[in-house]
Image (tube, rainbow, N blue to C red):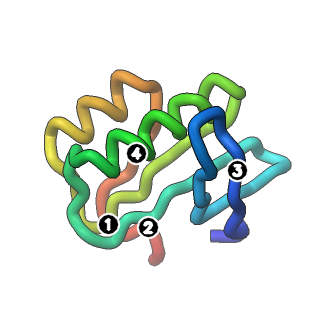
Amino acid sequence: MNGENKVFKTPTSNRQIDIYKGDDMYIGQLKTGKVYHCEQAKIDLEKDAWLVEQQYTVEYILEGGASKPFLDKLDELGIKYKIGSQIP
């Protein structure tokens, strides 16, 4: 996907980024299994919301889909998402 792995320091703790494209201010999070709005996801989304505030485009690639509460939270935070494989 023409990006690199990167770790960002956020106000709460570090955030591992799966796909970072600095020139485009793009951060992609690739999830291969179904994602739920669990405690770890809440922590990660707090960090991602901070990245959105810093003017990054944050996008989740949800190959295995996600629960409705998780998708609702992405919408609320202004985080984009795609469902299904994005590799042709």
Going by the numbered disc 2, the residue's amino acid type is: Gln
Tell me, for residue 63, which label it has, or none. 1
For the N terminus, give its image quadrant.
bottom right
Q: Secondary structure at mark 2?
A: loop
Tell me, for residue 7, which label it has, or none. none
How packed mark 3 is, by other alpha carbons closer than 10 Å (few <14, some 14-19, many 20 or more), is few
How packed mark 4 is, by other alpha carbons closer than 10 Å (few <14, some 14-19, many 20 or more), is some
Question: In this rendering, which labeled residue sits more in front, label 4 or label 3?
Answer: 3
- The outermost residue toward the left is 68
Residue placed under numbered mark 4 in the picture: 81
Q: Is mark 4 in CB contact (under 8 Å) with mark 3?
A: no
Inter-mark Cα distance, 2 to 3:
24 Å
Q: Is mark 1 in CB contact (under 8 Å) with mark 2?
A: yes
Question: In this rendering, which labeled residue sits more in front, label 2 or label 4?
Answer: 4
Q: Secondary structure at mark 1?
A: loop
x and y percent of residue 57 in the render? 62, 37
